[in-house]
Amino acid sequence: MDIQLKTKALELLQADADKIKNLIKQQTYALCIAQCKAFEEVVDTQMYGFSREVMYAVRIGFLTEDEGQEILSGLERELNMLYTEVADTLDEEGAE
């Protein structure tokens, strides 16, 4: 497979992953994550769409299954850290 195509596919997937992370980071400032069920559904929908993109890249040979799984796992880890930060912030504010 063409290395340039694989690199481009990885760049596009990373850009989409960054969009999801930025969406969540923007909402952390509004503290909407902990209070808005609709926001949680938006994130779930974004993650589902992103997982389909990754699986498509695997199916057409742009990524190996391991690479695809690592991309998804990495994004999930980062999102979990963001959620934890928000929960900790809310706990600290509630204790004051």
Image (cartoon, rainbow, N blue to C red):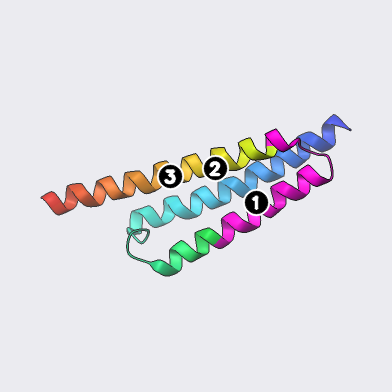
Q: Earlier in the sequence, mark 1 or mark 3?
A: 1
Q: Nearer the viewer, residue 70 or 18?
A: 70
Relative placement, left or right, of 13 versus 9 is left
Q: Amino acid at mark 3?
A: Asn
Residue stretch rendered in magenta on the structure:
45-67
| CA separation in Å, label 1 and label 3 | 16 Å
Residue 66, horizontal then vertical, whole percent? 69, 34
Asked whether residue 58 is drawn in magenta, I would say yes
Q: Tell me: residue 87, above or below residue 81.
A: below
Task: Give the CA distance from mark 3 to mark 2.
Answer: 9 Å
Residue named by callout 2: 75
Q: Relative to residue 47, is residue 79 depicted above or below? A: above
Read off the residue under disc 1. Answer: 51
> Mainly helix, strand or loop, the magenta region?
helix
Q: How many marks?
A: 3
In the rendered structure, which amino acid carries the disc numbered 1? Ser
Q: Which residue is mark 3?
A: 80
Most foreground residue, 21 or 72: 72
Q: Determine the residue positioned at 54% across, 52% down.
A: 20
- For marks 3 and 2 on the same chain, the one whose residue lies earlier in the sequence: 2
Q: Which of the 4 image quadrants contains residue 1? A: top right
